[in-house]
Amino acid sequence: MFKDYLARSRQSIQFHRNDIIALTIIAIIGIALAEMPHILWFLKTGSPLVLTDKDDLLYLGYATNSYFNHPLYLSDPVLKEGGPTIYPWIQFIPEVILAKLLGIDVGYINIIWRFWAGLSISIAWFALAKLYLKNTWLALATTLILMLDTGTVNGELFYKHFKDIGTVVANKPWNSFPEYPYFPLTQWRIITPGISLSFLLLQIWSLRLALIKPNITRILLAGASYGLLFYVYFYYWTTVTLAILIAMLMDFKNRKIYLEVGLIGLVLGLPSIINNALIKAKTNHDWLPRTDNFLPISHLSELMISKGALLLLFVTFFYVILKRKDLTYLWTLVFSGLLLVNNQIFTGLQIQNFHWKYVYGLILSFLILLILINLLSSLYLSKKIVAFCLIALSSFYFATGFWLLTKASQGSDFVNYNHEYHDYLKQKSNRVSLKPRSVIAGDDKFTNLAIITDNQIPLFGYYINLSPSVDNDEYSQRQALNFYLLGLDSSVFLPAQEQTLRGGWGPWVRNPQIRKERLETLHKYYDDVVANPNKYLAKFQVKYVALPIKDTQPEYLKKGWKLLQKGPSWLIWERFSS
């Protein structure tokens, strides 16, 4: 009897030891993957401070506004004080507080974000895979593939990764992800899904626990993790809500558990829904449609039909129903995401619908992996063969995933972003400090960096577009004034705006008449700015303007402005009178 007990104890110890080893491996690789842009740039230049894309600038602007002015809450960086934002507290403030406590430079907030992404996502994927597969090493291999495959986010597992490898090997133009071409593993993108994905995986994991062995503790945990999503990411909680409803119809046996979890989550998430509704009611009616949020569109327009995802959804339905009912909730998440990405069919709304890809694509990849592993296990292969295949596949993904990241970091856009960033830091070290919370205009390359490093307020740019406090009329005035301050006349301004209004966000992209009216408004304000520049300079309290170094400077600088710094990359002018 004692021998049996000792054998069971050894087996239990071995199980936990293997888990710890696997988790350590996964966490190290996850952190390395997430931090790769910083690591590669450090090896190249000696500095770890990196911006991977324009969204890095945007998110850091919100974070540094809190860091400099109010570390415990988030606010609109366009305003000197207060103001609601489109982003949730939980994605920004914990890292801001940590950076503040550590007393580190604001540029390192990006590194903290990526560290959290690498640690949390790798552990969450492993825990979820282990729960379904019941085997440490299978869970390890599954997690590695999900972390390193370039098709994970799109639900194009294996296919896209091999395609990207072939493209690079053949030395063909490579644009793996058009919106983030210098970071092909989009599962590590900051903020989404890097900061938020672990919360979704926690919800799936906790609900699976409740389904395996229902008790009050597990049901409360599953409900709480669902309720937390309301404070994390709109696209997560909407998908989960619909998935739970569908699961109640498909998995009738467990309908009571789904119902209890759903009710707990909805009660916990209700304050967030009310708060967001109040923000929408109190702010102007322009900012959400301007950013393609809750914008009315034709029911059958702008559809995102992924033939591959739909085919896989259809095939896996029969497998789940007939063979693996325990995968039902995963299947409903995929189905819900695919429905919501085309919600305009039912709602007539564009809500930046492509973001639901961050649910259905990721979960579809996981579902396919689980089914493939299950099918392979039915072949009765020897443990040695299985172990060899797992080691070979994991090694392949480890090598090619990091290799693709290295190749992507050589892209000109990535390099240019960071040369500009470090040019700014170099120029900053040789000048008088800019007065905090001053309005800065001019070249967006400088102004965006001034927001995140010098606590400045933008006159115009990405932040203005997203600001709930700025209506379209004020947006046009800011835009016209900024172009005037750049020294661009109407012959440049209007054609540039017409081209801009044909792409991107907003109702004018879809409606020529609205586009024409907006151009007329911009023309009107530009002419008024040229005639009365001091009126608008005073209205928006512009203190600084940053201009690229060139032979000629705008005439307006000769009166009421003084040169604060000349180069090496920008001229910084300060307004001293109205």
Image (cartoon, rainbow, N blue to C red):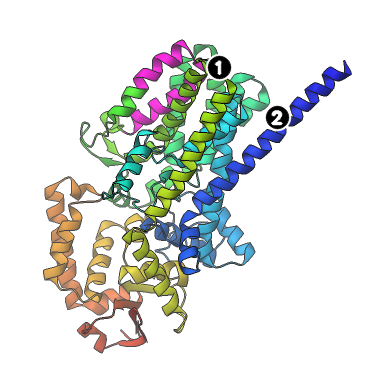
Q: Name the kind of residue labelled 1 in the image.
A: Lys
Q: Residue 281's spot in the image, x, y percent?
A: 38, 46
Q: Residue 84's spot in the image, x, y percent?
A: 44, 54
Q: Is residue 277 visible?
A: yes
Gap between marks 1 and 2, in whole Å?
33 Å
Q: Which quarter of the figure has residue 412?
A: bottom left
Q: Is residue 408 left or right of residue 14?
A: left
**Which type of secondary structure does the marked residue at label 2 adopt?**
helix
Q: Which mark is residue 15?
A: 2
Mark 1, mark 2: which one is toward the viewer?
Answer: 2
Between 278 and 276, which is closer to the camera in this rendering?
Answer: 276
Q: Which mark is residue 281?
A: none
- Local packing at callout 2 (Cα closer than 10 Å; few below 14, some 14-19, many 20+) is few
Q: Is residue 208 visible?
A: no
Q: Name the kind of residue labelled 2 in the image.
A: Phe
Q: Residue at x 52, y 53 (%)?
A: 113
Residue picked out by circle 1: 256
Q: Residue at x 46, y 35 (%)?
A: 237
* Magenta highlight: main SS: helix
Magenta region includes residue 509: no
Q: Residue at x 26, y 79 (%)?
A: 534
